[in-house]
Amino acid sequence: MLNEKLNIKGDVVLVLTDENGNLKQRQEIKNLVVTSGLNYISSKIVSSASTVSHMAIGTGNVAPSASQTALISELDRNAFTSTGSANGVCTFNAQWSAGDGTGAITEAGIFAGSSGGTMLCRTTFDTVNKAAGDSLAITWVVTISV
C-alpha cells in the first residue's frame, strides 16, 4: 500500500550571546508551516519562481495560525547566512550581529524576499532580550517526510 501523506515540520534553535561570545540564552522550539508556506512548497514543484531567502524576527506574541502571512510585529529581516538541503531536510541559518535587531524578540519567520514576500513558517517563543552588544543566531530546520 502507498503512503501518500506528507508531513512537514520545523524545529528552530535560537542562540543569544553577549559581546564576548558568552552564551546568554538558548531555546529550541517548534514552528508552524502556514497555509501560504504549503502553497509555496507546492508551487515550487512546478515552477522555479522566487526562493526563500530571508529570516525575520519580531516582537509579536500572537500564537501562530495557518492563515498568517506575516509576522505580527516585524523588527528586522536578514538574508540567510547559509542554507542546506538533503534527504528531505532543509536547514536555514541567519545571524543578527551587535546593533542589529535589538529588542525583546518573541517571534520569527522564514520568507521569500527581503521585504513582504511569501511566509513559509512562523514561530513564537519565550522572550529573547537582545541587547545592543549581543549577537543572535537562529538555525531553522524544516523536515519533509512521509
Image (cartoon, rainbow, N blue to C red):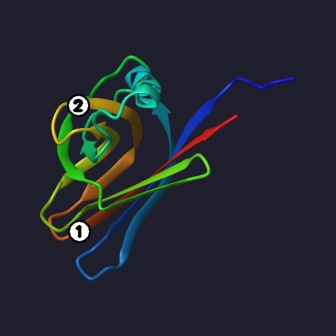
- Residue at image coords 38%, 33%: 120
Residue 71 in the figure: left or right of residue 3: left
Above or below, 108 relative to 37:
below
Type of amino acid at the residue the image marks with label 1: Asp
Of circles 2 and 1, the one toward us is: 2
- Residue 134 got which mark? 1
- Residue at image coords 43%, 20%: 35
Type of amino acid at the residue the image marks with label 2: Gly
- Residue at image coords 26%, 45%: 57
**Residue 36 drawn at (x, y percent):** 38, 22
**Which quarter of the image is occupied by the C terminus?**
top right
Figure quadrant of residue 9: top right
Residue 59 in the figure: left or right of residue 14: left
Is 42 in front, or is 104? 42
Above or below, 134 relative to 146:
below
Residue at the disc numbered 2:
117
Q: How far is disc 2 from disc 1 in space, using C-alphas?
A: 28 Å
Callout 2: helix, strand or loop? loop
Q: Which residue occupies the extreme top position in the image? A: 67
